[in-house]
Amino acid sequence: MWGLLLIGASSSPAASPPTPTGAAQSIERIQNGLLPPVLVKGETPATHKLSDRMEALHVPGVSVAVIHAGKIAWARGFGVVRVGGSPVTPDTLFQAASISKTVTTVAVMHLVHEGKLNLDTDVSRYLTSWKLPPSEFTAHSSVTLRKLLTHTAGVTVHGFPGYAANAPIPSLVQILNGEAPANNPPIQVDAMPGGQFRYSGGGFEIVQEILSDTMGTPFAQLMHDLVLQPLGMQHSTFEQPLPGKLLAGVATPYRSDGAPVDGGPHIYPEQAAAGLWTTPSDLARFAIGMQQALSGASSVVLPLGTAHAMLAPMYGNQAIGFVVGGSTSRKHFSHGGANEGYRCFLISYRDGDGAVIMTNGDNGMELVFELLRTIGYEYHWPDFAPPERTMNAVEPGSFDRYVGAYRLNSDDTVAFWRADTHVKSLVSGQGAVEIFPTSEHEYFAKDVDARWEFLSGASETSATLYQNGQKHVANKMTGAEGEAALKLAMAIDKRFKEQTATPGSEAALRRLIEGLASGQPHYAEMSSGLADLTRRELPGLQKAVAGFGSLQSIAFKSVAPNGADIYKVTFEHGVREFQLRLDTDGRVDFAFFSG
């Protein structure tokens, strides 16, 4: 697949956390005691200092704001705005990336309440400067604001890489049409509107065009007037590019290897989807504004009824502009963000708690969730804090009946095997983790909050995964298919330990890059799933890879936990990191590259 799978935070309750005695004490405990994903009864948890994890993950700066009882309990910066630079403060600006979508959505809902927009009207009635390209899909089902804001409009373009400071910046119409100098393919409808969830930053650029056409006000000014100013978000702006007077106070973005993003922060003319500059404190004010609207305490931006309608689940956990959830009666709404060199997350309970975490590193999301589970533990949240598990001794051989590969309903596979007294599991696309027994038929992981229950019957054997408040049943695969899947999982684990490149992977990478740059990929050398995805995304992939210039050199770096080989690839216009993994037939079944 062209992408990266992230495992979300735990949604299991914590075990008797200490009662906070004040903001300073809470900050001290969090800063010096980041918790592991799982606590084991009777074991001292292996905690880490925030500064150590920042160094290990090449994240120079982190900024945090915590909401408690409907107010900002504390806001604190950690680390530096750039390597060798000044400290991060609560007023240091970060890119909010896709959290921009939630702020945009609130502006839309404000206009819906005023009767200036309708969630269920065909958006073609609102668009004047640009028209949605007609398709066989829109002929049968119209694109509406409700569908755009819930990622169910069938619109293309997942996200945007932005533009270097010295690059030409396209207009919104050029972005929508995928015309030079835009670096994205055309934004269009290629699936039935309302038929499925598919995350689309492109859909929010259609929303941006609707707001511009209907209101006649520049987007950044409109957002300031409708949301930022009313909520007191004085350190926030949708201006792109950011005015020069503000650039000196921003956090510099960094790549996963610790190198700064070439030229500094990218410019995002895709304002509605990714263009907000802000601070955790300002996003906390935004979250508190939503909390107050939901309780009826304030209607500064949204009235009570509109706020509740906005957060009603529409497609799974996807609401209008937010993801909603909660394992108890305490429900929350959230959204994450990922721009070049920035990672961030906003989580807010409806009843007055929450947190906003912003980082200036591509590895920042891993740190975000470490902070999130520690904050959740500190403040007694019913979700996100690490669960406590009990480990008991069992006869190692009792697991042998469960050894094998299983297929989940998602069509992913999971393999289990035993190495002496150790039991390993590997979900396809992820790394291997050791699992530990609570009983002969129940095991849990320490590296991630995941619990497995096994059932072996006369006709079939199954494994049920409990994670993030959900359960997923996997049935054991039989015959050659099951044997091959188990063998592959064990081989991936072995290669990760040995850190050796897959034979033929460098040559496969060269052919992959050449094929993408020319617009003629070697589909026969890809798995069927990757080939189908590449066909759909080829215009954007070709534009990105061709823009790197001629290929200069390829150097193997390491093996990722999921078995993908990681290469440092030098192009005429810079260095990029590529990952690819070969399946047992030598075909590429996973590929990913940094923008």
Image (cartoon, rainbow, N blue to C red):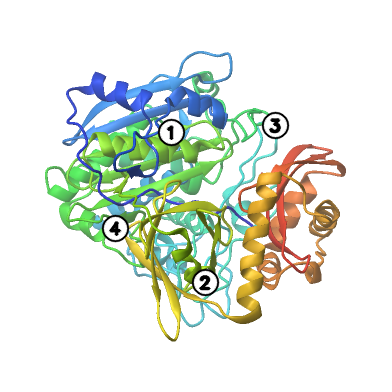
Looking at the image, residue 340 sits to the left or right of residue 304; the answer is right
**Amino acid at the residue labelled 4:** Val
Q: Quick one: quadrant of the C terminus? A: top right
Q: CA distance from mark 3 to mark 1?
A: 25 Å
- The local secondary structure at tag 2 comes to strand
Q: Which residue is mark 1?
A: 358
Q: Which residue is mark 2?
A: 406
**Amino acid at the residue labelled 3:** Asn
Q: Residue 1 location in percent, x, y?
A: 63, 61
| Of residues 474 and 139, the one drawn nearer to the viewer in this rendering | 474
Sequence-wise, the earlier of marks 1 and 4 is: 4
Q: Tell whether label 2 touches label 4 (CB within 8 Å).
A: no
| Of residues 151 and 275, the one drawn nearer to the viewer in this rendering | 151
Q: Which residue is mark 4?
A: 112
- The local secondary structure at tag 4 comes to helix
- The local secondary structure at tag 3 comes to loop
Q: CA distance from mark 1 to mark 4?
A: 30 Å
Please name the residue shown 23% across and 43% down the image: 15
Q: Residue 586 location in percent, x, y?
A: 78, 65
**Amino acid at the residue labelled 2:** Tyr
Foreground tag (1 vs 4): 1
Q: Residue 156 location in percent, x, y?
A: 57, 63
Q: Which residue is mark 3?
A: 166
Looking at the image, residue 395 sits to the left or right of residue 290; the answer is right
Q: CA distance from mark 2 to mark 1?
A: 38 Å
